[in-house]
Image: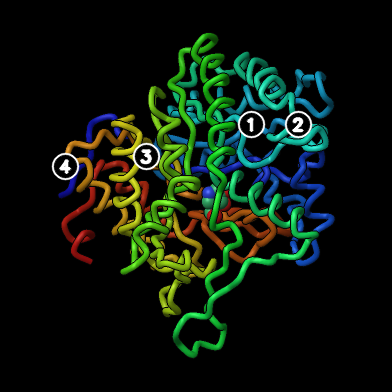
């Protein structure tokens, strides 16, 4: 059997906007109403009211940790007005986890911000740091007993969106960057698209400053370990792509791994791997195993990401805060996760300090404008909100209970 260290956390992750429903004061809610082609989050999967059932299912399966996020726009729907009732709601979630012996991992900001914050310029606005810190101070009042706090989720993806938006604004709303046709005669022409490929490193430095300010508040006011969670691309160079790889990876990732130096942990989030050639990101080749979001089936991406994060963060302890696959085939999910965990065990055997594994996601949920990509260990009927655990939930619970993978699973 491949075993994991004692005390290793085994869990699953979610984010408020993707599961709670009716997050009406958030910038994403407003964006969904405006953007053609985007599906609406609406009631989501009503986890705002059903969180007990969700956490209970996780605990009953044998998982020991639940990562979820606080919704800033519920807690501070109007600038400077902090809702005691919403803070109490999230406190109840934390207490319910603790009652069940589930370790809560709390994200303070997972992609969404209040609409009023966005109207003031968002993260680019002159008061961004002070405004976020004022919210973090309030959030700290409910974190008693919480051991793990992430200030922000995937600031690097937020930066990639900001970079793309700036580019769009500068080009009068037209996406002007060239695309390059790749070889192959697949029906959907594969192109190098630059959209979301780059993130301006300056934005990374801005986020790092804000993260460090929030980190100081969390350290001063709570006993939690604090870090942030970063989207890892597990990028590699195709022949001739070595320089381009360094350029893309610096703004999109490395500036964030560097920013996590001195943190108590860094959250690694990996799903797939992609090559970079001289033109940029090479599209995922068409394959029957590709996921519902078009990415390649690459369980090895987790170990690749962990090794890179460990090196650039200068050995900051690692928590896997997301890893999973968008698939309608639950057997593929188990196959993927087995491979990912096998690779993860290899990184630990090589001396990398990995503290836990949180699968994305506990529930099928709102994938930022789309409902089709299903990442969940639990299916949800969106009319009745009935939850149906998939075999992968029981399987991951068994892995957690034995704190290891059976030899037969590894070989499968
Ligand atoms: O759903 C997202 C999550 O919000 C952030 N990380 C990647 C997930 C899957 O795309």
Reading the image, the residue beneath label 4 is 349
Q: Nearer the viewer, mark 4 or mark 3?
A: 4
Q: Mark 1 points at which residue?
A: 70
Q: What colouring method underlies this structural image?
A: rainbow
Residue at the location (23% across, 31% down)?
6
Check whether the beta carbons of the residues at disc 3 and disc 1 lie within 8 A of each other. Answer: no
Q: Mark 3 points at which residue?
A: 10
Q: Quadrant of the C terminus?
A: bottom left
Q: What element carries label 2?
A: helix
The crowding category of the residue bearing disc 4, from other C-alpha atoms within 10 Å (few below 14, some 14 to 19, many at least 20), is some
Instruction: Specify whether 225 is left or right of 213.
Output: left
Callouts 1 and 2 close, C-beta under 8 Å? yes
Q: Which residue is drawn at 42% across and 45% down?
A: 61
How many C-alpha atoms fall within 10 Å of the one at disc 3: few (<14), some, or many (≥20)? Answer: many
Report whether 1 appears left or right of 164: left
Q: Name the residue under label 2.
A: 74
């Amino acid at each position: 059997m491949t075993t994991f260290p004692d005390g290793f956390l085994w869990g699953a992750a979610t984010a408020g906007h993707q599961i709670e429903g009716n997050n009406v004061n958030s910038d994403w809610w407003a964006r969904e109403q405006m953007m053609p082609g985007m599906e609406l989050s609406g009631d989501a999967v009503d986890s705002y009211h059903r969180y007990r059932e969700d956490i209970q299912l996780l605990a009953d399966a044998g998982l020991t940790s639940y990562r979820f996020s606080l919704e800033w726009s519920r807690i501070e729907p109007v600038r400077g007005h902090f809702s005691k009732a919403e803070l109490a709601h999230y406190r109840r979630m934390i207490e319910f986890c603790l009652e069940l012996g589930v370790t809560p991992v709390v994200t303070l900001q997972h992609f969404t911000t209040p609409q009023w914050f966005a109207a003031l310029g968002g993260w680019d606005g002159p008061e961004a740091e002070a405004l976020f810190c004022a919210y973090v101070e309030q959030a700290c009042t409910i974190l008693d007993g919480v051991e793990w706090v992430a200030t922000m989720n995937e600031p690097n993806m937020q930066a990639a969106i900001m970079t793309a938006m700036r580019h769009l604004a500068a080009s009068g709303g037209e996406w002007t960057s060239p695309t390059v046709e790749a070889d192959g005669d697949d029906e959907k022409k594969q192109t190098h698209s630059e959209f979301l490929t780059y993130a301006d490193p300056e934005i990374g430095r801005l986020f790092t400053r804000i993260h460090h300010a929030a980190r100081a508040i969390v350290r001063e006011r709570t006993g939690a370990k604090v870090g942030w969670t970063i989207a890892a691309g597990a990028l590699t160079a195709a022949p001739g792509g070595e320089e381009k790889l360094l350029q893309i990876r610096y703004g999109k990732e490395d500036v964030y791994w560097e920013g996590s130096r001195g943190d108590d942990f860094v959250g690694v989030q990996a799903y797939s791997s992609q090559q970079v050639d001289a033109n940029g990101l090479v599209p995922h080749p068409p394959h029957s195993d590709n996921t519902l979001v078009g990415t390649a089936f690459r369980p090895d991406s987790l170990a690749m990401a962990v090794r890179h994060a460990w090196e650039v963060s200068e050995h900051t302890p690692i928590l896997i805060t997301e890893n999973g696959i968008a698939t309608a085939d639950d057997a593929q999910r188990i196959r993927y996760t087995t491979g990912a965990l096998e690779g993860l065990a290899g990184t630990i055997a090589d001396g990398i300090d990995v503290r836990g594994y949180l699968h994305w996601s506990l529930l099928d949920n709102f994938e930022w404008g789309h409902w089709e990509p299903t990442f969940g260990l639990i299916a949800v009927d969106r009319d009745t909100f009935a939850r149906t655990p998939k075999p992968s939930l029981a399987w991951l619970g068994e892995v957690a209970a034995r704190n290891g993978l059976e030899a037969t699973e590894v070989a499968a």
